[in-house]
């Protein structure tokens, strides 16, 4: 076209791409890979090693759905490319019109039923997981109330003290300390808007909603620290709502609890 600045197009099968869109697509792809591989926060598409049984269950659900989905995706793309390449226009006579087929009942029933079965299977699989890991557990009498606010988290322990963690962009924020080998019930609350507590290695995203309590739990058998963040866009300080879960063995944990209680008493 006269006056057009576009260079010669690139053909990918029957798809025509301008050089600029190819550069953009490859650039975005490269940026995605680079960003996801630097391991900041929860950006990586690969889950960290789960340390709590519910983290493991969520990981299994993720793998159980993703692997069949990837296989189906690759199958569909291969079939699509095969049709696009084999029946491309340049190999057909100029006046060629493909066979016009209308109505094939077995085929139509099959392509309605097959996706329905896949979607229902995913729904059932996810629902069972939700019932298992996001209900108040009855086997624990140790409940920590996790409360989200703009912008930070408060952890109220059954011993009566509260750990305040204000939002910060610093890498080391005040940790949410838990004992090892103990089932801890988590009760989520919100004081202003909806937040979502998410530590991928420990538990799934759980919304902290004003006026409504959500539940999850954790049971960590090793000493360590795991990162997470608020997963619900909650305002300008959303990115500061980092989370660190730190587990301690029973003696260290008890000493930490005593220290917190003493601090709470000295500053009314
Ligand atoms: Cu938030």
Image (tube, rainbow, N blue to C red):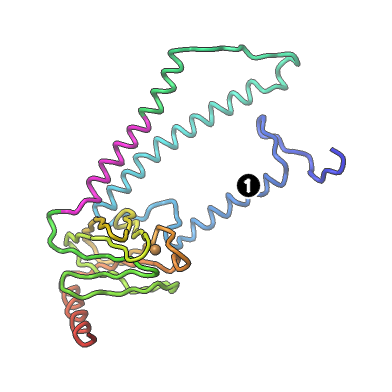
Q: List the single residue furthest toward the front.
A: 211
The total of numbered circles placed on residues is 1
Whether residue 166 appears in magenta in the rendering, the answer is: no
Identify the residue at horizontal 41%, vertical 51% (top origin): 46
Which residue range is magenta in the image? 118-137
Q: Position of residue 38 (x, y in %)?
A: 49, 61
Q: In the picture, which quadrant includes the N terminus?
A: top right
One can see residue 103 in this view: yes
Res 121 → quadrant: top left
The quadrant of the picture showing ligand 1 is: bottom left
Q: Mark 1 = which residue?
A: 25
Majority secondary structure of magenta residues = helix
Query: Seen in the image, is 198 located left or right of residue 155?
Result: right
Q: Nearer the viewer, residue 75 or 237?
A: 237
Q: Position of residue 45 (x, y in %)?
A: 44, 51
Disc 1 on helix, strand or loop? helix
Identify the residue at horizontal 34%, vertical 67% (top origin): 244
Identify the residue at horizontal 35%, vertical 56% (top origin): 200
Q: List the single residue furthest toward the right.
A: 2
Vertically, is 24 above or below 64? Answer: below
Vertically, is 49 above or below 152? Answer: above
Whether residue 125 appears in magenta in the rendering, the answer is: yes
Q: Position of residue 189 (x, y in %)?
A: 28, 62
Query: Seen in the image, is 142 located left or right of residue 191?
Result: left
Identify the residue at horizontal 34%, vertical 40% (top origin): 64
Query: Seen in the image, is 40 located left or right of residue 175?
Result: right
Q: Nearer the viewer, residue 183 or 233?
A: 233
């Amino acid at each position: 076209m006269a006056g057009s600045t576009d260079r010669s197009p690139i053909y990918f099968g029957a798809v025509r791409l301008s050089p600029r869109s190819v550069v953009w697509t490859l650039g975005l792809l490269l940026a995605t890979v680079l960003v996801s591989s630097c391991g900041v926060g929860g950006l990586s598409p690969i889950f960290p090693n789960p340390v709590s049984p519910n983290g493991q269950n969520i990981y299994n659900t993720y793998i159980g759905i993703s692997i069949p989905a990837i296989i189906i995706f690759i199958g569909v793309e291969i079939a699509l490319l095969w049709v696009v390449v084999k029946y491309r226009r340049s190999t057909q006579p100029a006046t060629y019109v493909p066979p016009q087929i209308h109505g094939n009942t077995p085929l139509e029933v099959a392509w309605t039923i097959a996706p329905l079965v896949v979607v229902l299977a995913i729904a059932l699989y996810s629902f069972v997981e939700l019932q298992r890991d996001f209900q108040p557990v009855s086997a624990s009498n140790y409940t920590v109330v996790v409360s989200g606010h703009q912008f930070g988290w408060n952890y109220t322990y059954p011993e009566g003290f509260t750990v305040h963690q204000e939002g910060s962009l610093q890498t080391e924020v005040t940790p949410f300390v838990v004992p090892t080998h103990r089932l801890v019930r988590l009760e989520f609350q919100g004081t202003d808007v909806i937040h979502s507590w998410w530590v991928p290695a420990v538990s799934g995203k759980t919304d902290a909603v004003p006026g409504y309590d959500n539940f999850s739990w954790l049971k960590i058998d090793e000493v360590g620290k795991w990162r997470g963040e608020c997963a619900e866009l909650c305002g300008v300080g959303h990115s500061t709502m980092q989370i660190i879960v730190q587990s301690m063995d029973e003696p260290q944990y008890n000493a930490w609890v005593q220290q917190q209680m003493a601090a709470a008493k000295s500053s009314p």
